[in-house]
Amino acid sequence: MLLPVVVAVTIAFVLWKYFSREQNELAKLPGPPRLPIVGSAITFLGLSPEETFKRITALPNEYGGRVVLTAFGRYILHTYNVEDIEIVLSHSRNIKKGMAYSFMEPWLGTGLLISTGNKWHRRRKILTPAFHFDILKSFLKVFEEQSKSLVEGLRQLNKGGTDVVDVIPFISDYMLYAICETAMGIKLDSDTSETKIEYKKAILDIGSIVMQRLTTIYLHNDIIFNLHPLGRRFAKCLDKVHSFADNVIMERKKAYGTEQNGGSKRRLALLDLLLEAERKGEIDLEGIREEVNTFMFEGHDTTAIALSFGIMLLADHEEVQERIFEECQSLLSDSDGGISMSDLGEMKYLEAVIKEILRLYPSVPFIGREVVEDFMLDDIRVKKGSEVVVHIYDVQRRPDLYPDPEAFKPERFLESDSRHPYAFVPFSAGPRNCIGQRFAKMEMKCVLSEIVRNFRLAPLTPGARATLKTDIVLRCVDPIHVRFIPR
Ligand code: HEM
């Protein structure tokens, strides 16, 4: 009974929006055929996540640097023009995230990634000190320990008789340990391994559900979605991720209390800043939960994906591994006390390798904004209510900006950099750039240098590349398998 009413109301609303719409200047721009009412939504209908990824990334080749899609009266501008990207990302008031993010709200709430306006400004102010140089410096020990224990894990697999590793799940475990220990001040141990596995499975599931919802227009409606089997699966996943996050908060609250009372040396963790803000009445427990969920996800999944694609690329490029090895040997051979911040700063070649990995495989391939204030792109007015999607993935593979764009060539980033500053934006840019980018680069340097110093990587099938699919972060259809041969 309820469903037909909801459908009728939705259709009436859409018809009203369609017939009462003003002419939008974005309508002048090219794009896939736009049918009345449904617009170009039909383009993605029935496509698999893998086909959707191919279709989205083919848009610039088919239609040029600015492509417009429409759906139910909404205009969505897809851009891979560096000049447009600069205008969009550096705008100080157009910081509201696009519609796709709202489907993640039941999970991440309006935490730092999704919030906007004053709430975002307040939260960013509370959380920025958690990424101060001195604090990152204090995380170095954890990154080093985790990298060593990751290498030890690889040795154990070797001893068990195999040198072939399913890279993504293996790496992502260590990235989860690292974010919990650094930002949350919690050491995950074997007791939590079951809930940890459940948590990671739930995150993968949430990503694919959000994308299925995004490309299935009738599931955009909350009531229909919640009644749909997909919505029920989503609710189960939410239970799992929320209980994992709640446990982390409880654990830290306990430890934080004892540290304060016992006067033991205080660990600087992001979660501590949030707990302190709670005491001052600047945030409530629900707010803390939003941020813990946001940082646990953003802080481990993005780096795990980047490292996994990186390992795949390195396996195929022995000469790059050797250069990393030599650089690390010359810097670290007589450092008995482990890696220092200045060692990391000196790893210029590894830095270029990491940039090249993130150019080819940016963990967040597309980002979206909902326009809250009209702005101009040359002579085109982008009106309030439209959306803009920045194709990070595509701009970073533009042949005019990166000759031989599909090739893995870290030297590109060693040469003097005359590229437009918005031609390389894996961490986004402007006011809503990635708050964790220095954290991520440090962690990636520690892990990659430790792996390359201990193993030679080799591909199972030389030259093979992962098939990518749409998700909330970059993911591939099949596992990445790489051989880790002890040096
Ligand atoms: C290779 C690793 C990473 C990549 C490629 C990456 C990329 C990005 C990108 C592109 C954005 C902008 C998203 C958007 O506008 O929708 C972003 C935002 C964000 N990232 Fe990262 N990220 C990485 C690692 C991290 C880490 C390690 C953390 C936390 C420790 C983190 C926390 C965040 C947060 C909280 C935001 C939202 C910031 C805001 O809106 O104020 N990220 N990241």
Image: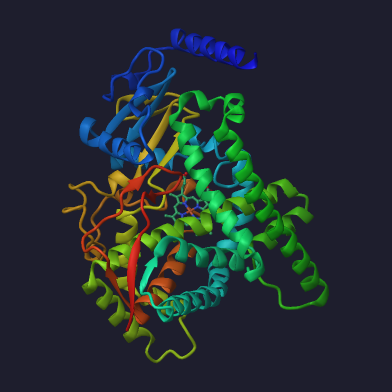
Q: Is residue 418 visible?
A: yes
Above or below, comparing residue 232 to residue 385 in the picture: below
Residue found 34% across the figure and 63% down from its top = 481
Is 416 rendered above or below residue 265?
above
Total marks shown come to: 0
Q: Nearer the viewer, residue 105 or 350?
A: 105
Image coordinates for residue 330, horizontal then vertical, percent? 32, 86
| Residue occupying the point 49% across, 46% down | 432
Q: Note whether 417 is above or below 123 in the view shown.
A: below
Judging from the image, the colouring scheme is rainbow
Instruction: Examine the image and state in which quarter residue 105 appears.
Output: top right
Residue 145 drawn at (x, y percent): 52, 78
The answer to whether residue 254 is left or right of residue 70 is right
Determine the residue positioned at 38% across, 75% down: 162
Residue 451 percent coordinates (x, y): 38, 76
Can residue 187 be seen in this snapshot?
Answer: no
